[in-house]
Image (spheres, rainbow, N blue to C red):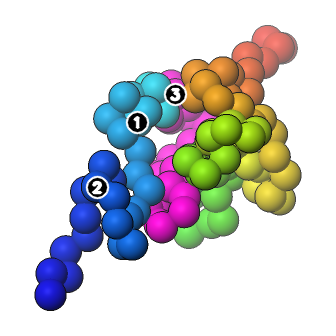
Amino acid sequence: MNSLTPFPGKSGPDQVVAFHRTELGPIMQLYGRMVAAGEWRDYGISTLRDVAVFSVFRRTAENPLYRIEKRPKLRQKQGEYAVFGMEGQVLKRGHDLGTVLRVLERKLIRPVD
């Protein structure tokens, strides 16, 4: 029996949801801008059976500030992408990853004192 994790594109009972390279590109661009702004410091990626999660941290040993989730089962309903806040509230949900990530890009825009 093979104990290796199957590729995300394969179908079967042990299928794992993961972010594709085209999805990680915009996420990592946003992450880089937020790190440069001093807002974020670390991230973690989890790939599970029903969901892939990109978690963002201000410090390494904290709870995540934000979670970007991909749930393919919700593709036909409310959209497979969602951004959750620290308290678990849904900040944005939708079918297009770029649109969903805009809720976090607004955090970069602050008034100048």
Looking at the rendered image, the quarter that the N terminus falls into is bottom left
Q: Secondary structure at mark 2?
A: loop
Q: Does residue 60 appear in the picture of this structure?
A: no
Furthest-top residue in this view: 112
Residue 104 screen position, x and y as percent: 69, 30
Residue kind at label 2, given as amino acid type: Lys
Distance between the Cα atoms at labels 2 and 3? Answer: 29 Å
Residue 17 screen position, x and y as percent: 44, 56
Label annotation for residue 71: none
Q: Residues within 10 Å of mark 1 (few under 14, many from 20)?
A: some
Label annotation for residue 10: 2
Q: Can you identify the residue that label 3 sits on?
A: 30
Residue kind at label 1, given as amino acid type: Leu
Q: Can you identify the residue that label 1 sits on?
A: 24
- Per the rendered image, the range of residues in magenta is 30-54
Residue 74 screen position, x and y as percent: 66, 47
Q: Residues within 10 Å of mark 2 (few under 14, many from 20)?
A: few
Which one is in front in this view, the residue at disc 3 or the one at disc 1? 1
Left or right of 106: which side holds 9? left
